[in-house]
Image: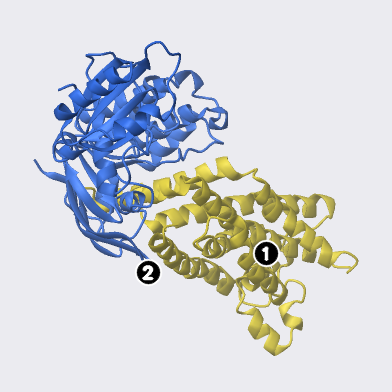
Chain colours: A blue, B yellow
Amino acid sequence: MSDTIKVEDLTKYYGDLLAVDHINFQVQQGEIFGFLGPNGAGKTTTQRMLTTLLKPTGGRILINGHDLGRDAYPAKRQMGLVPEESNVYTELSAWGNLMFTARLYRVPRGKREKQARELLETFGLWEKRNVKVEDFSKGMRRRLSIAMAIIHRPTLLFLDEPTPGLDAQSTRAIRRLIRKMNAEGTTIFLTTHQIEEANQLCDRVAIINHGKIAAIDTPERLKAAFRRVQSVEVALEPIGRETLEADEPLKALGELPGVTHSAKMGDKWRLYTEEPSALLPHVVDYARSHDLQMVSLCTLGPSLEDVFLEITGQKIGTVRHDTQGTGGKKPGARGKRGGRR
Amino acid sequence: MRSWIERLQDEVAQAWTVAIKDVQVYYLTPPMIMFGLLLPFFLFFSFSVKREIGAEVGLARLLALTTFFTASSAGPVIIPMERRTGTYDRLLAAPMSLVTLLLGKTLVGTFFATLVSLVPLLVGLLALGATVANAALLVVSVPLASLAFSAFGLVFASIPTRSVGSIMMPSTLVRWPLMFISGIFIPLAEMAPWARVLAYVSPLTYAQDLMNHAVLGQGFLNPWLDLALLPALLVVFLIPAARLHHRSRVLGY
């Protein structure tokens, strides 16, 4: 399979500050490639260089074999860009925005109107096509921004944080569209903070930290490489008492043999360990000896978020986990981050 | 692979698309009204009232001021606004050359200035009873001067910033002195030789002289020189504008 993006020794300095440090990676044709990293890691800087908006200090970028440093024109014709902020013209209507973009990308007249209509219908904006975008909600602007990025049918689409701040319906619609475009052959470069989104959508992910690629692989292989961040999750209720003291079980559970660290997550406690099976009897014993009933108990493999936090040097359990689309766990239910084992 | 003719057709159409979009989006924004429409009139009345100038002299002066201030305001208002909202990235990422984008932006100022120039022209002709010596020359002169001044404004608009204020300050610092040295208020013929040398540095001098030829039927310089220099200035101003855009791309604006 050929490389749609090939990055060689890419470097960016802002004055003396090294923002991107000699990175190398490839994105294959037809892939959904996730680009993850904490704030200030170099994600947006890299994406702006890939989309010609920022001049690299050093290195080379090839898009479908075209060197951006030599002639960006053929590569630009094949790209679509959805930036983090929905950069739509609020003074124009949805239709006006789409027509402007289509003309800019030289989409033929008959085709541009047909495609604009299809996209507006797909994104649920057809009824509002003549309304000025200043009256649109954030979700509607986001959908329009994506429609503008794909009206010329790009073979490579850059998406920067496509779903944060959107309602569940818009988020699902956008993720569905990403999968559909990918199934039709579009390569997707997805920059996101939402690790679960990357986990669900991406064939491969790269994690960038301090301007360097810290890891690059499929989500499952990355998780498999970080067995030490497995965990046991337990929900406890007191027998014969109304409630538990907030810190009561956390401290004691954290001191059980084999627990590297622990965190309270909603009504549950998560205990990180390298040996979940060895820890389970200790948790059961603790519950029995303290007159506590186990509402749920499950072992979890490392989540992509855990891997991300390990690689970027942040403490596991300090970042709120993305719980979108998950209900409450019942005893015996599969954990979404690795499953019961 | 597109042939160079197809590419050229694309680039012309893209420049036109950018210009039309800007006209649709920005024609009634407050900074455009302030800097592009009202300012030339304020300046004209500040320096002309009670000075007993003829209707034709006043008309030529106002036309030069209007093209100068309106055309050179469009870019400095629009580009930082687009940088702030992120819409400028949309243009920079599109498959067109930087020159095409700059020409599109230059056309916007030209449209605005040509359109706004109709106001003093109609006031001069209908209210003040002024006559125009060479209407054909005037029809050519106004868009030509606007084109050069629009490119002049683009030099400031290309400064790497997202703030309209940060561009308006250097732009005003340069444009106002140019207005005073350009033979607008003191005709070239009445200037001291050293002042006339200074006047030749200003692009506004050639527009004022051309307006004098068109409205009054006489100017100080050869009208062909004015007609040749104004489009040449377009090219001259696009060079620093392009260089500043390259600088913006390095800095990340």
Q: In the picture provided, is A230 more to the left or to the right than A1? A: right
For label 2, the residue is A16
Q: Is residue A240 left or right of residue A199?
A: right
Q: Is residue A33 above or below residue A21?
A: above
What residue sits right under mark 1 in the picture?
A: B214
Judged from this view, the residue extending furthest toward the right is B50
Nearest the viewer among B114 and B227 is B114
SS label for mark 2:
loop
Residue A181 in view here: no
Q: Residue at x 35, y 47 (%)?
A: A38
Query: x, y (%) of residue A107?
Result: 33, 36
Q: SS class of the residue under badge 1?
A: helix
Number of other residues with Cα within 10 Å of mark 1, as a class: few under 14, some 14 to 19, many 20 or more = many
Q: Is residue A15 above or below residue B37?
A: below
Q: Is residue B152 visible?
A: yes
Circles 2 and 1: CB atoms closer than 8 Å: no
Where is residue A14? Give x, y as percent: 38, 64
